[in-house]
Amino acid sequence: MRVFIAGIDGYLGWPLAQHLTARGHEVAGMDMFLRRQWVEEVGGQSAIPVYPMEERLKAFEEHFGKPLNFRKGDLLDYAFLKEYLAEFQPDAIVHLGEMPSAPYSMIDQAHTVYTQHNNVIGSLNILWAMKEVCPDAHLVKLGTMGEYGTPNVPVPEGFFEIEYRGRKDVLPFPRQAGSFYHWSKVHDSGNTMFACRIWGLRSTDIMQGVVFGTQIDAMGDDPRLRSRLDFDQCFGTAVNRFCCQAVIGHPLTLYGLGGQTRGFLPLRDSMQCLTIALENPAEPGEYRVFNQFEEYYTIEELALKVQQAGADIGLDVEIHHYDNPRKEMEKHYFHADREHLINLGYQPTHDVLAELRIMLNDLLPHRERILAKQDVLVPDIRWDGSRRRSTIIDEQLSTVS
Amino acid sequence: MRVFIAGIDGYLGWPLAQHLTARGHEVAGMDMFLRRQWVEEVGGQSAIPVYPMEERLKAFEEHFGKPLNFRKGDLLDYAFLKEYLAEFQPDAIVHLGEMPSAPYSMIDQAHTVYTQHNNVIGSLNILWAMKEVCPDAHLVKLGTMGEYGTPNVPVPEGFFEIEYRGRKDVLPFPRQAGSFYHWSKVHDSGNTMFACRIWGLRSTDIMQGVVFGTQIDAMGDDPRLRSRLDFDQCFGTAVNRFCCQAVIGHPLTLYGLGGQTRGFLPLRDSMQCLTIALENPAEPGEYRVFNQFEEYYTIEELALKVQQAGADIGLDVEIHHYDNPRKEMEKHYFHADREHLINLGYQPTHDVLAELRIMLNDLLPHRERILAKQDVLVPDIRWDGSRRRSTIIDEQLSTVS
């Protein structure tokens, strides 16, 4: 299968290119290296060294025995995108080319506007280019479980059948996102659903949980083939950040009560799920939604697992509650379906502790890189538009409860 | 009350400035005159002459005895917007500054991107500027009934209480918009709801039906105070276009079966409803949704009313079915609530025939202006991205039924 990856230099895109190539697929991709810029802008760096693209491409060719079809370019450059897709004629497009950080989108007016412009217009360009030059391709678009927010009812996969005032319909499940970034993904979902309806495009919209991990099997040992792993407040996601904190002896930073429940999945599972979606495409005109996560956990449960994995390899890991810079419910009902991928053969990892031990061992050699940028471990971007570094609130919480 | 109008030169903005001033409110506003450009771009012109802004402002001052606080500027220019709002310190902002045409948004990639960029970013700028310089102001934002699409269940006002798999919640009603323009308004609604939640802003989001009409009481007889009235396929809405067709003897252009049901309201009612929303503001942190329409009709019912009103004043009006350039259901269930405005005192016009006769009489003196641009009366912008002029399909329909 010919697979085009937008955002092929990123945390998911780079391993996905390898995973799909190892499975015998023909891969091409584009990237503007914006993720590298954003992480630098917020004062972070990848804990695992990221090599220049020329080095990555050289290692790719050595390891897989053929060059990777890559071009530097921006999804906002419609002419570039359309020409590349017209030439490559993909069977599938995986859209990973978006600005993925909630805090980054909340910094100020300029960052909110940048986020929604970049994500919404880039995604519209993909839809229009598909319609114009490869209308039979299957779009696998990365949404996020965060689109749903935290409703007090179970979260289905995209659509639900309801009875309301005596009548029935199957409707899109309402979205209640929690940041301007998450809303940009909601906007993309609406635009994609509509493009499938009017143009007969086909799409699988993946509501992905929070991914963590440093390894997939296809990578081998070449450091040039490793994916990035961010730990700053913007681009480091919860578990990845916890593991980086654990290896330098920094307390794990729980936001507020830590009862926030989210879907999570290891990087390996993300690769497995995306591959299943690609190899079992939607029908022409079909817009389907897959919820993609291994299991849902509270943030505190995950912190405790990182603490346990740390203890297993001799690390003493502390956990503290910090005042929450976000505006979100810190304890709430949560239940979400993820039957579609299971029905297509997804086998969840389940052994999260083993995965965490691998991560900690992978990160230990890079302690100095994390220590050098440890200022970005504790958040200061607040949902009220201000900047103030969070402080430990364990005592206040214990007097409350 | 100090009211700021974004889009004050437009079809609704210009009469609203007069209506509010006549009621004793202090009005200021901005406009970039983009509507004038868009209509020219698609080959149309306003049936009722639109004067240059300097002329409009002169007439305003003569009629109302005080100048209108106006500045030319773009909502995409954040610095300009923020400074203007900081100076004026509005109690309320009415956001009419968006590209309002479904067909225009469907022309090609460039027009889709233009529409969503203009509308989403302009609206984000208003939210951020409010947060930064006038957080207590009340945002009255114009959405559209078209955000809801045509679900098979009744449409509540923004939110509905549901029971799903044994649990209950009050959730945003799902949106299923029918053009990239309508989706831009859905995106705005999501962003606005979120800004109210995290920043404590207050907003009334008006899901407005299709407005028609040439007159409001506050205007008086000065032609410089009249509002525009477009009849082209992009910026002319159904009833306005039918009336322009009627006065030049062009058949009314029903799309497909004509069973599409939509909420409609006369321009007078739109002014009345917006005023009610302004004078009964939302609470701090509240995001409320009003459905705003006089009644819902099928497009065919309205065409028959225009035919009747024409007959009343001696015009012989034909109605034809044209092949539908849009992708939409041409017969469907439709029921929508509009209790919030009624509860606050909205008195619907009801005598639509009388309103249509006024419109036809207002348009008769401008027959030459419509005849000069009659090429734009029959649509050619199709939802599949092509351009092909619709043709009369009465015979196919009669053989089907």
Image (spheres, coloured by chain):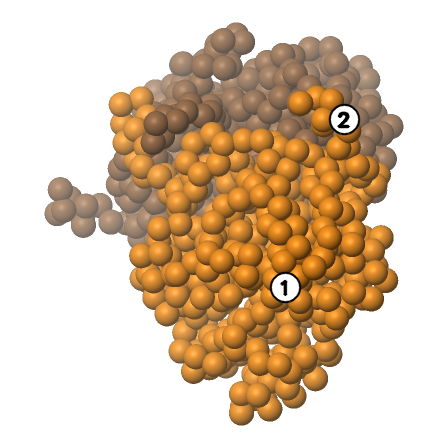
Chain colours: A brown, B orange
Relative height, residue B327 to residue A327 (above, below): above
Q: Nearer the viewer, residue B395 or B380?
A: B395
Q: Nearer the viewer, residue B304 or A18?
A: B304
Relative height, residue B395 to residue B260 (above, below): above
Q: How far separated are the C-alphas under marks 1 and 2? A: 32 Å
Q: Residues within 10 Å of mark 2 (few under 14, many from 20)?
A: few
Q: Secondary structure at mark 2?
A: helix
Task: Give percent across and percent down for residue B396.
Answer: 76, 26
Q: Which residue is mark 2?
A: B396
Q: Residues within 10 Å of mark 1 (few under 14, many from 20)?
A: many
The residue shown at (22%, 45%) is A394
Q: Are marks 1 and 2 on the same chain?
A: yes
- Mark on residue B359? 1
The kind of residue tagged 1 is Met
Q: Quadrant of residue A192?
A: top right
> In what quadrant of the picture does the N terminus of chain A appear?
top right
Please, which chain is the residue tagged with disc 2 on?
A: B
Q: Quadrant of residue B344?
A: bottom left
Please, which chain is the residue tagged with disc 1 on?
A: B
Q: Secondary structure at mark 1?
A: helix
> In what quadrant of the picture does the C terminus of chain A appear?
top left
Note whether residue B219 is visible: yes
Relative height, residue A172 to residue B344 (above, below): above
User: Is B83 on the left-hand or right-hand side of B390?
Assistant: left
The residue shown at (85%, 53%) is B375
User: Is A295 on the left-hand or right-hand side of B44?
Assistant: left
Q: Nearer the viewer, residue B238 or B66?
A: B238
The kind of residue tagged 2 is Gln
